Amino acid sequence: MEDKYLIEGGTTLHGSVCISGSKNASLPLLAASLLTADKCVFKGVPQLLDIRNMVKMLSGLGAQVNHQGGQMVIQARELRETEKLHLYARKMRASFLLLGPLLVRLGEVCLPLPGGCAIGSRPVDLHLKGLSALGARFQMEKGYIRASAGELRGCDVTLSYPSVGATENIMMAAAAAQGKTRIINAAMEPEIVDLADFLNKMGARVTGAGTRVIEVEGKPELHGAAHTVIPDRIEAGTYMIAAAATGGQVHLQRVAPEHLRAVIDKLREAGVTIEEGNNELLIKAGRKMHSLKITTGPYPSFPTDLQPQFAVLLSVVPGESTITETVFENRFLYTRGLQQMGAQIRVDGCTARIRGTKSLIPAQVEATDLRAGAALVIAGLIAPGRTEISGVYHLDRGYEKLEVKLASLGAKISRVADQAANL
């Protein structure tokens, strides 16, 4: 039975909310635990659908996983290949992050091509080219990739695009390879830095994380380590935008303001007041809001994972705003749902033109992907009346206790079983 959200919109958000650990940091960290037979301990791993699916894959591979009281302990003494991986790998792209660690531990592995949100082409060729340079060999077989490697050796790897996943996969394989690896044109996201910090705790020597050139001095025998996951900057940004869009005031706790600089700058440009503290932010909606021009891009540019949410805010800001998407060609699929709710959005190629209106109208809409779902929730909070959002399992992939946290801020939101899904 599928669930849906019922939202009675028209209320402002007020109060305080604690940001969960980062989903996009946790997934590569959990994959990296396979690099050693020792115990790895993680704090702050969020309880999300994607995390549960990753845990099922780790368990299926033979790792022991214990998740209690905000702490996850993983020990992969012995690993085995399993054909059941495809049941979970098809559901999320992060499953492909297992490739590098499994090559290190097993020398040979067969993985299904990954799934995830249908927001555009996200080829794995950069992963394969990078790992091939280290000595891996690949063969495609009916939706699967069979990989093998003898001894992995460090080298220079130049990425044609700063792919986050490819950077992470190469980092993990290089951490246990012989010699030095340089990743040129590497991704600079905070999640990359978090993975580098964990690999260093395991005994690798990773320098330059957070810049375009990362150097990894491999160590074939890595050991266990303990690590606390960084806060989720996309969750934080979503609550920041929701506070501004509803005319509210929200205090964010356990947040890293330095990871949100592009978002903070754009919200301030729009007229939102933001006070920064030590691991906290106070968001105050502006009395007079301004239209904007936004262009997404790899970090530190404006994140593509927050542009659907920002489009909702701009839908109720006077004047015409534009959002240009440079990362995913199908990211604007969410605009159809917002148009149903009265948003005046016109998509022209890779640019969305948004003309602000006084308010939105409630509707029955469907979340087509994770961030589209977040955008519809914010729209539902704005629109006076009842909005019904189906497909909320997408939101379960990336937002921990979303309806609970929003309700604590004064939102009138409930989660109910969607009886229509079974008719």
Image: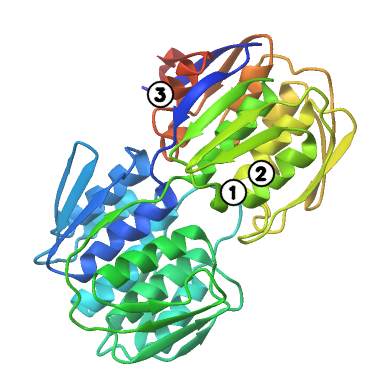
Residue at mark 3: 2
Residue 48 point in image, percent of width and height: 35, 38
Residue 320 point in image, percent of width and height: 89, 36
* Mark identifier at residue 264: 2
Image marks 2 and 1: residues in contact by CB distance under 8 Å: yes
Looking at numbered disc 1 in the image, what kind of residue is underneath it? Answer: Leu
Residue at mark 1: 260
Image quadrant where residue 408 sits: top left
Nearer the N terminus, badge 2 or badge 3?
A: 3
Of the residues tagged 2 and 3, which is closer to the observer? 2
Q: Nearer the viewer, residue 336 or 206?
A: 206
- At x 56% / y 25%, what residue is drawn? 250
Q: Is residue 3 visible?
A: no
Label 2 packing within 10 angstroms: few (<14), some (14-19), many (20+): many
- At x 61% / y 78%, what residue is drawn? 160
- At x 20% / y 36%, what residue is drawn? 69
* Mark identifier at residue 197: none
Q: Is residue 91 visible?
A: yes
Q: Quadrant of the C terminus?
A: top left
Instruction: Specify the farthest residue to the right.
Output: 319
SS at mark 2?
Answer: helix
Image marks 2 and 3: residues in contact by CB distance under 8 Å: no
